[in-house]
Image (spheres, rainbow, N blue to C red):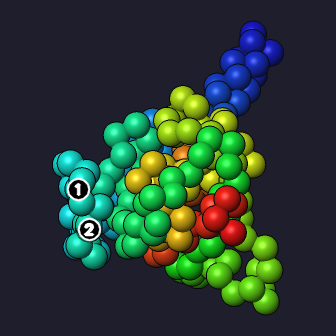
Amino acid sequence: MKKTHYIIFCLLGLALVSTSCNKRKTYAEILKDETRAIEKFILENKLVVLDEFPTSLVFKTNEFYRDPATGVYFNIIEPGDTASKVKEGEEVYVRFIGLRYFTSSNDTTEYSNLDPIRSPFPESLTYRGPVTVMNRSLYSGTTPGWAVPLTYVGHAGRVKMIIPFNMGSQSDQQSYSTTYYDNVQYRFESQL
């Protein structure tokens, strides 16, 4: 009888300990947190999210378009040479300034790869066509979200971006880190 009580108490204790240690968030909770963080960022920075893409390619400083296929927000600072559109299979070189991870309260640093001394080589991606959440794996080894504005801008185009973690780099996807880029600059291999 004592053994039975002892076993029951041990099992109950083990059940209590194992349930209290399970404090991990679900993927749905992580997505909800990201949505709240993006909404907060938009409010704090007085950004306006456009319902339709401006065909003139002209954005006001605080206007962003949210790509419905990817959830990437972007603002075209400078469309660049729109006569020279990126071609499928072409190498695109990316320089950026003002990279911030705004879902992490611990990291307030802004990152950049614009300084040729600190970052002698730009990031690059091979353009594989318009990006969707389903085909983002075509851009493995890079940040798929960078390719989203390429259907609108040309060589030397510049954009601001909010990239949800699922369209970020592999590291951003693994750490669920949403990013904001103050200035992303594109150079097409065929134009160099």
**Is there CB contact under 8 Å for labels 1 and 2?**
yes
Secondary structure of residue under mark 2: loop
Q: Which percent across, then down, holds residue 120? A: 80, 80
Picture residue at 44% right of the left edge, 41% below the top? 70
Say the numbered circle drawn on residue 59. 2
Q: Tell me which amino acid carries mark 1.
A: Pro
Q: Which percent across, then down, holds residue 118? A: 78, 86
Q: Which percent across, then down, holds residue 114? A: 65, 82
Secondary structure of residue under mark 1: loop
Please identify the quarter of the rendering in which residue 155 is found. bottom right
Q: Nearer the viewer, residue 73 or 151?
A: 151
* Residue 191 appears in the rendering: yes
Q: Tell me which amino acid carries mark 2.
A: Phe
**Distance CA(mark 1)–CA(mark 2):** 7 Å
Q: Earlier in the sequence, mark 1 or mark 2?
A: 1
Picture residue at 78% right of the left edge, 73% below the top? 121
> Viewed as shown, does residue 50 lie left or right of 171?
left
The residue identified by callout 1 is 54
